[in-house]
Image: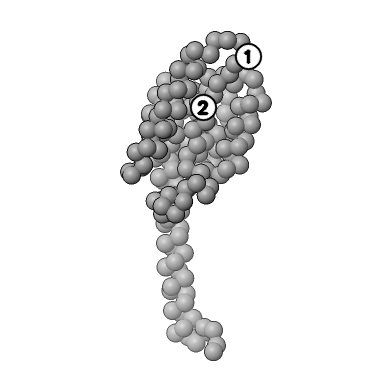
Amino acid sequence: PLTRVSMLTRHHAAKHGVVGLFRCLRIGSINPGYRVNCLCPYFVDTPILGLGGKMILYNAAMTKIEDVVGAAVQTIANEDLKGRIFAIIPRTTVTKIREIGLPIPEDINSEGEERAVWDVENFEGMSGDEFTNRIVALMNFASAQKAATAKLRDVTSVFWGAFMWLFGMGPRR
């Protein structure tokens, strides 16, 4: 989805340019046999991120490359998909999407099933920016949960190590 991260001005300009081009092509593609769809992946864990990107996104939930490829294949294979925008985010459940206030389309009814591809156009009555802001809120929540779990694991490890050392159960030298 289109979202902001500081220091990535060119990246954001390119993303907005792609979506703008898509919207023009969607309106102009009235010729039969031509289809245009737009895939908007969240941050994907690939080498293109580089060290700087990985540092900025440390402990953030990441989209899997398999989900992006799967969405691309689906849009190519399904000829009924025309002029659609798909957000590809880290896998989440319908329940979590509902918790952040996104209305769930009627054709999606499996609460516990995790999915990564969401048809933005199916969220009727909601602008793309509103959809994006809520998805970003979900990703921030997921990242905060992941960070809290990592901190708890680190603190537990420190206390466990101190306990083992105090009672002489640490590694023998």
Name the residue that disc number 2 marks.
38
Give coordinates of residue 150: x percent, y percent: 45, 60
Name the residue that disc number 1 marks.
33
Residue at 53%, 19% (x, y): give it.
83
Is residue 46 at least partly visible in the picture? yes
| Secondary element type, mark 1 | loop
Is 113 placed left or right of 166 in the picture?
right
Q: What is the residue that sits farthest to the right in this orientation?
A: 77
Please tell me whether residue 9 is drawn above or below residue 143 in the rendered image.
above
Q: What is the residue that sits farthest to the front in this orientation?
A: 10
Please tell me whether residue 81 is drawn above or below residue 117 in the rendered image.
above
Is residue 101 at least partly visible in the picture? no
Which of pointers 1 and 2 lies earlier in the amino acid sequence? 1
Residue at 39%, 24% (x, y): give it.
127
Residue at 44%, 26% (x, y): give it.
19
What's the amino acid at mark 1? Gly
Q: Which mark is residue 43?
A: none
Mark 1 and mark 2: span between their CA atoms?
A: 17 Å
Q: What is the residue that sits farthest to the top in this orientation?
A: 31
| Secondary element type, mark 2 | strand
Please tell me whether residue 40 is drawn above or below residue 8 in the rendered image.
above
Q: What is the residue that sits farthest to the bottom in this orientation?
A: 173
Give coordinates of residue 16: x percent, y percent: 40, 29
Give coordinates of residue 126: x percent, y percent: 41, 24
Front residue of 94 and 2:
2
Front residue of 164 and 1:
1
Badge 2: residue crowd in 10 Å (few <14, some 14–19, many ≥20): some
Give coordinates of residue 147: x percent, y percent: 42, 55
Picture quarter with the C terminus: bottom right
